[in-house]
């Protein structure tokens, strides 16, 4: 009699198959949300008088407006298969233009915002031209562009802190809706619009298709270059909006202070790939990721953790998120083959 044994991989697959498919799918799609809920409950129990208060929670949400917009800005380029590291630089130059024009030169606030967003769009077009038409790797182009923009911002501001931005803009962004700043709700609205575009419009689906396989998309007749240019410009426009929100919230800015938001933005965008629709760039997942990371850092700080915990948190989030996203992508490809 011959005794055969299943290999470990087969046994693991058989064991996994005993778990209902819907439950496994739920875990993959909403695992981060579950961890977020557990973390929220944990911090509420451990720090009920500081964490679980209306003041802390509304302040935490309100403070994430600019970061949500910046993280959402990362998504269009990623969806098109590119990486745009200039988002923090675009955010900086847009905030600087608004601050300098309105706060220092007393140009009308609406005109100042329009000009700042036009600058952001111009930067996006330059990035796209160099990356898409010239063929320079986007990560190289945008890294250099980010440094260039921060340098120009310091030159414009003469290395000084810009103040005196119209209080009307501040009241508009900082005004409270359900206890949370209007800027936060604006960022959420932008995320919902992006989600709709990628989920329910032909243009959005085409961009996602290009991000997965640009060559196949080109052979299918899609205008790959034009759609990539559009993705870069939308990325820069959203980063520019984030800059407007920053300068409105604070009434001014120090140009070098915004570069620290680059890692949190990418951490949230990458982590968002593991939420709701694993393996894809989705705006709703990005928003949830921002709030999840903010909750963790806020709770740990209130429990007495040192300030370096944010760097550890965001760095770990990037590593874990990219790993999970890669696993999810491989699983999705295997399912499509089967």
Image (spheres, grey):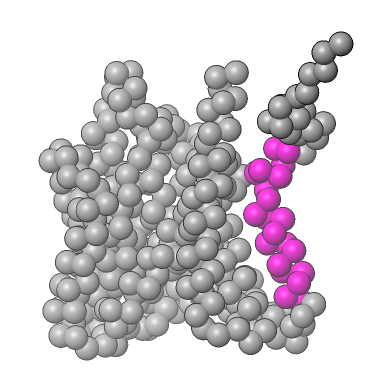
- Nearest the viewer among 268 and 254 is 268
In the displayed structure, 50 sits above or below 131; it is below
- Nearest the viewer among 265 and 303 is 303
Q: Residue furthest right?
A: 1
Query: What residue is shown at x 48% (from left), y 65% (from top)?
Result: 315
Q: Is residue 211 visible to us here?
A: yes
Q: Is residue 286 visible to us here?
A: no
Stretch in magenta: 24-44
Percent coordinates x, y for residue 126 in the rendering:
16, 51
Q: Residue furthest top?
A: 1
In the displayed structure, 142 sits above or below 88; it is above
Rendered image quadrant of residue 107? bottom left
Query: What residue is shown at x 72% (from left), y 62% (from top)?
Result: 37
Percent coordinates x, y for residue 207 in the rendering:
37, 35
User: Which SS does the magenta portion mostly show?
Assistant: helix
Rendered image quadrant of residue 327? top right
């Amino acid at each position: 009699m011959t005794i055969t044994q299943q290999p470990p991989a087969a046994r693991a697959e058989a064991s996994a198959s005993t778990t209902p498919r819907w439950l496994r799918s739920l875990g993959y799609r909403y695992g981060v949300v579950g961890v977020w809920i557990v973390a929220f409950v944990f911090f509420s129990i451990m720090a009920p008088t500081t964490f679980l208060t209306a003041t802390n929670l509304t302040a935490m949400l309100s403070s994430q407006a600019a970061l949500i917009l910046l993280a959402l800005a990362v998504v269009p380029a990623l969806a098109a298969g590119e990486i745009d590291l200039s988002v923090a630089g675009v955010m900086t130059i847009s905030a600087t233009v608004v601050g300098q024009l309105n706060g220092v030169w007393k140009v009308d606030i609406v005109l100042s915002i329009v000009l700042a967003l036009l600058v952001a769009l111009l930067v996006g077009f330059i990035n796209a031209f160099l990356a898409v038409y010239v063929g320079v790797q986007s990560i190289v182009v945008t890294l250099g562009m980010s440094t260039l923009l921060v340098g120009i911002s310091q030159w414009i501001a003469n290395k000084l802190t810009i103040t005196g931005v119209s209080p009307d803009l501040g009241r508009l962004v900082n005004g409270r809706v359900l206890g949370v700043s209007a800027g936060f709700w604006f960022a959420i609205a932008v995320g919902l619009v992006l989600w709709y575009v990628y989920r329910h419009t032909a243009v959005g689906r085409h961009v996602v298709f290009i991000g997965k396989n640009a060559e196949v998309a080109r052979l299918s007749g899609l205008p790959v270059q034009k759609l990539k240019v559009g993705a870069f410009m939308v990325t820069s426009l959203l980063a520019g909006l984030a800059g407007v929100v920053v300068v409105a919230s604070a009434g001014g800015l120090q140009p070098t202070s915004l570069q620290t938001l680059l890692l949190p933005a990418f951490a949230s965008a990458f982590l968002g790939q593991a939420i709701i629709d694993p393996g894809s760039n989705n705006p709703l997942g990005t928003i949830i990721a921002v709030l999840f990371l903010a909750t963790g850092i806020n709770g740990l700080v209130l429990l007495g953790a040192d300030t370096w915990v944010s760097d550890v948190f965001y760095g770990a989030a990037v590593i874990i998120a990219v790993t999970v996203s890669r696993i999810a992508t491989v699983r999705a490809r295997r399912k499509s083959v089967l």
